[in-house]
Amino acid sequence: MPRKIAADAQVETRMGRRVNRKVSVLLTEIESEHVPDRLLKLARDLQQALGEKLGSEKAGG
């Protein structure tokens, strides 16, 4: 059984690295794209609202 767990952990590690590489490539591509000012403002507003919601959920619950 320990070998199976170790093998599963290795697979998860490899998958995680692949996903990290894909995410890295996507983020690089996204960063090179022009983003309209209105979209940036909406994204910041959303980020702030989510932060406030998460903060209030942690404090209350």
Image (cartoon, helix red, strand yellow):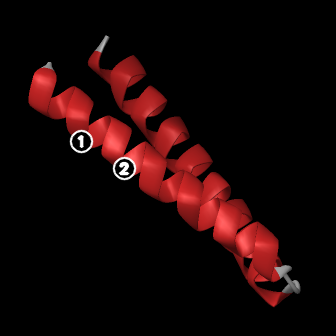
Q: Of the residues shown, which amino acid type is indicated by label 1?
A: Gly
With respect to residue 31, does 8 lie above or below?
above
With respect to residue 15, does 47 lie above or below?
below
Disc sitting over residue 47 in the figure: none
Task: Report the residue marked by disc 2.
Answer: 51
Q: Secondary structure at mark 1?
A: helix
Q: Of the residues shown, which amino acid type is indicated by label 2?
A: Gly
Q: Alpha-carbon distance for marks 2 and 1?
A: 6 Å
Q: Is residue 17 visible?
A: no
Determine whether, in the image, residue 47 is placed left or right of residue 33: left
Determine whether, in the image, residue 4 is placed left or right of residue 34: left
Residue 33's image quarter? bottom right
With respect to residue 2, does 31 lie above or below?
below
Q: Residue furthest top?
A: 1
Question: Observer-nearest residue: 48 or 4?
Answer: 48
Question: Observer-nearest residue: 40 or 23?
Answer: 40
Q: Secondary structure at mark 2?
A: helix
Give percent across and percent down for residue 26: 77, 68
Q: Is residue 30 visible?
A: yes
Give percent across and percent down for residue 34: 88, 86
Give percent across and percent down for residue 24: 66, 72
Determine whether, in the image, residue 6 is placed left or right of residue 15: left
Residue 42's image quarter? bottom right
- Disc 2 and disc 1 in contact, CB within 8 angstroms: yes
Quarter holding the N terminus? top left
Task: Report the residue marked by disc 1.
Answer: 55
Q: Which residue occupies 50% across, 38% down?
A: 12
Q: Which residue occupies 61% across, 45% down?
A: 15
Q: Which residue occupies 82% across, 89% down?
A: 32
Dot 1: within a 10 Å radius of its alpha carbon, few (fewer than 14), some, or many (20 or more) residues? few
Q: Which residue occupies 54% across, 38% down?
A: 11
